[in-house]
Image (spheres, helix red, strand yellow):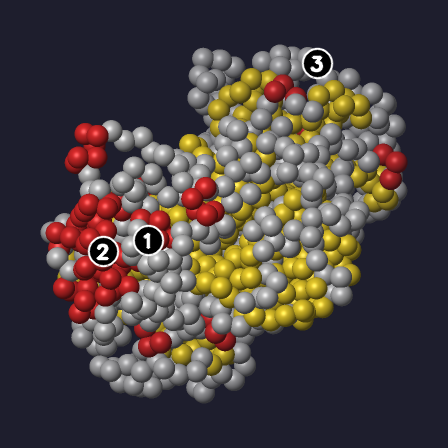
Amino acid sequence: MRYGPLVLLIALVGCSTSKTTLETMPVCPPEFRQEVYPFAVIGSDGSALNHPFFGGFNLPRPQFADIDADGDLDLFVQEVTGYVKFFENTGTPLEHEFVWRSDRYEGLDVGEWFRMVDLDRDGDLDILAETPYSYMRLFRNDGTPEAPAFTTMIDSLRGADGSPLFADRQNIPTLTDIDCDEQLDLFIGRVDGTVLRYESIGNDDHGLPRFSLVTQRFEDIEIVNQFMSLHGANALVFHDVDADGDQDLFWGDFFEPGVLLIPNTGTCAVPNLRNEPIPFPISDPVKTSGYNAPIFADLNADGTEDFLFGVLGGAFNPHRSSVENFYFYSTTQDDLELRSTTFLQGIDVGSDSYPIFADLDADGDEDLVVANKISETNFDTGQVYYFENLSESGTVQFQKQGLLPFTGHFHFAPAFGDLDADGDLDMLTGTWNKGMLYWRNEGTAQAADFVQVENMTVQLTRGSNSSPVLVDIDADGDLDLFAGESSGDLNFFRNTGSTEVPSFELVSDKFADIDVGRRSVPRFADLDQDGDYDMIVGREFDGVAVYLNVGTAREPTFEASGTLDIRMPVYGVPALVDIDHDGDLDLFTGGISGGLLFFRNTAR
Amino acid sequence: MRRFPALLTLLLAAVSSDLQAQSRSPVFSRDILPVLQESFAPLLERESGLELDSWQALMAGSDYGQVVIPYDASSSLLMRLSTELDPSDPLSAQAAAIDPAELALVREWIQQGAPNDEGIVAFADATNLLYACIEDAATVVVIDMDANMIIRTIDLQSLGFTADAKPHHVAVEPDGSAFYVSLIGDDVILKFNRRNELIGQTSFERPGMVQLHQNQDLLFVGRSMKAVNPPQRIGRLVRSTMELEELDVFFPRPHALTIHPDGQYVYVGSLAENRFATLDHEAENLELQSLEGDTHTLVQFAISPDGRTMVVGGQLTGLLLIFDISEPSAPQLTHQIKVGAAPWHPVFTPDGAQVWFGNKMANTATVVDMEARQVAAVIEGLAQPHGAAVSPDGRFVYLSNNNLNGAYQSRYTWRGETLPGAIAVIDAESQAVLRMLEVGPNPTGLGTK
């Protein structure tokens, strides 16, 4: 009998069976180190992905800034609330080379948005960000331009009258000196399509900048009238696109599939933005699912700013932009040229990525299968991607081979195991709300041909997002079934059939009274090297829960044993595999953003 | 003298007061009435129908609505005229002439409930109440649907919530014993009793529409727009305990929300996808239904009294979609009616014959004949109408007007840039706008029992 990799007894090194610290930490906490570039992953076009395990983007809010004063622009991208990813530019001003450094730059909590700007005019970049909900917080840079050190200013940013400045958190503000008076102006788009303008009036006694409201209707801009809507959200930025010495306004909006340019036809000192919005780029306006967050940055030191934007997903179906959502236009002599819709290239299957490893071609190594919630092109189905393991001579390498032929359901959640004892891997796949489907492999171990056995669908008693795993939990020689679900409970089905003909009988839909919160995804491995299966459970928030088996291989008893010491994404889906063949289990995880994160087990 | 409405008389209730308290407090006939008649009368010249010869007459208001809101001096027209007129308004000179001591006296009297000489506060027993969220003022106003006047204001800041709390929608218990308000800005759902006392609250990220379950102790809560990526879940709250759990709905930005009268199925629409969901909330089974054609951006549902028909407006298409829900688990789209720009919250009349809703970007309201499945009337003169409600007897339709675009012009010129909102009171039969009850900025959701 062959089992899927998650049921292999691969022990973690250095684990103790002591139970003295179970309340707060796993008995044998593995030491994981996050890596974005652990090995090569080849894309479907044959080229290597430059950031294979960056985790994917669904809502990228990018900014560029030379945070270390080395003359080139570093990249900061917010994907989820509160976190900013940091990619250091290790290249040159002429040719950028971004390298991932952190998923949470300097540990800062930026709420829903951030802007890097020298607010206190001391020559280094401060960070203005949202403090939940919908107010503004300053992270003042008390370091140097070369070595920033941010101090969290505890209070909200306040106006001249002392009241906190408010910006609906879905509207991303911007700052610039709009009238060349050497005072920063702050602009906040509002849900009704108008723009508030504040002007800096210096710092208060605590060194916090103060802004005075200049007008509630800056230049009488009212974008909303064009799109006949008031359920809006927007992202603003100023940039002198026509090099006439004044700042033009760029506007992304929930109801706007493109980016709008509002040209400034005034002067630097006396701006005039009372002009009709123009879709941008003018020669070939972009169209996405909407709610685009534009920025400009000179990425090749040619003296002109390139145009980039993140797609946050507006009224026109955000699933469409779950993969292609970080656009990069470079400036040419006369125009802008679209260079990429995925400025950072990594594994990204859309949203809610669900990885699992299995040797699908019987070549002795673990291939990678990654399912998603929903296709970015067919909104009636999820998808299952296949990445073949092409490792040779100790060099790990995967290549994206395309889609496995599964359609018609959302949230595929595959599990593999030989359920009919014919020497090849069959599949049980969870779905969003249609139970767990059994697919018998009627091909070979080398070339699978999965055929659904419709009368063997396993249903949950309630809820959705079934996430199965096959494991011989009672050591009787056949594979039993555990399944997570949307509520966070666990379901246990014992295989009361045989190795040839499985029959899954529900034992409990609240197994061991375990409730991990929401979206439970169980996985099994012998974490403490005592010869039985322990369990880890992915979930929506709060990382990977660990349950050590304090019973036996035949009669397991799971005991809550803390969490793995890693930062899991929302809707984390763990997958354990010894990818580097060093005898310990490494961890991959999917998540809401559609990519994968990799954590190398450094115990050995 | 104008007759004090008999109905209002019925709504009066005694408020306990003792002689000692009365000696400290302003007494209407002794302290207030003379001041009103002498100093305030010139300010009120545009308030046709208002008479100042008695407490009853004052509390009955003018042809435009209330002049005094008990316990809320700052929102009472009487005080606003005295303190908030723009200098360009000709009445501002009269306002400036009022003795500050008299002003303070009247303010104190209103803050104490504006009682009559016997300590009676007007509208204490009003039963047909309409609650209106005033989003940019962080208040909820209470309207007596018999008198069609604002009778109370709930100031959320005085209860500890922020100036940006943004009350958005309201749902009322069938017996009027309590009501629930979603606060978008403060991420909380509040529960008030009929005396407008806060008796419960529950955290919920970016709450939007709220809907009562008709026969279970449940309240369902959707999401507002105000987050970059709000959770793709709705809330199911136990009203008696205010305990809340969240239910997945699969798609982003679940906004439109209603419950079938049978109580089993909840309908949820997305602002970001062209589809909606039918949720069997007990089985937690959800089915998606895609809509063909252009992106609608579904705003809000309404279900007919007989439970057989559901309507929802498409914000971007200007269509009213009509579904046959006689089989509640599988709504069937039967009609699409062009109704003008941005149809917002629809409401059925009690007999189910008509659906009313505002067209937010057309400054109109549409009346749809549900038997003929066609537009019966378009009502002009509104200002970004948002929420909708009907009085229990079906006589009046109420539409909140955001008026962020200034389409509604106040009878007065107020200081500052902030535009007032208004609650339109419309005669359902004649379709005439009877009153525009001026409220704070950006009124949104309405709720009645």
What chain does mark 3 sit on? A
Vertical position of residue A532 compared to residue A284: above or below: above
Q: Which residue is mark 1?
A: B58
Discs 2/3, front: 2
**Which amino acid, by three-letter code, is at mark 1?**
Leu
Answer whether labels 2 and 3 touch (C-beta < 8 Å).
no
Q: Position of residue A376 (x, y in %)?
A: 65, 59
Q: Which residue is mark 3?
A: A554
Q: What SS does tag 2 mark?
A: helix
Vertical position of residue B375 compared to residue B13: above or below: below
Q: Badge 2 local density, few (<14 within 10 Å), some, or many (20+)?
A: many
Tell if the residue under mark 3 belongs to the same chain as the one under mark 1: no
Q: Residue at x 76, y 59 (%)?
A: B333
Q: Position of residue B34 (x, y in %)?
A: 20, 53
- Is B150 on the left or on the right of A199, as rendered? right
**Residue A303 seen in the figure:** no
**Which amino acid, by three-letter code, is at mark 2?**
Leu
- Is A146 on the left or on the right of A348, as rendered? left
Vertical position of residue A250 compared to residue A168: above or below: below
Q: What SS does tag 1 mark?
A: helix
Q: Residue at x 35, y 80 (%)?
A: A273
Q: Which residue is mark 2?
A: B36
Q: What SS does tag 3 mark?
A: loop
Q: Residue at x 44, y 63 (%)?
A: B436
Q: Earlier in the sequence, mark 1 or mark 2?
A: 2
Of the 4 image quadrants, the one containing the N terminus of chain A is top right
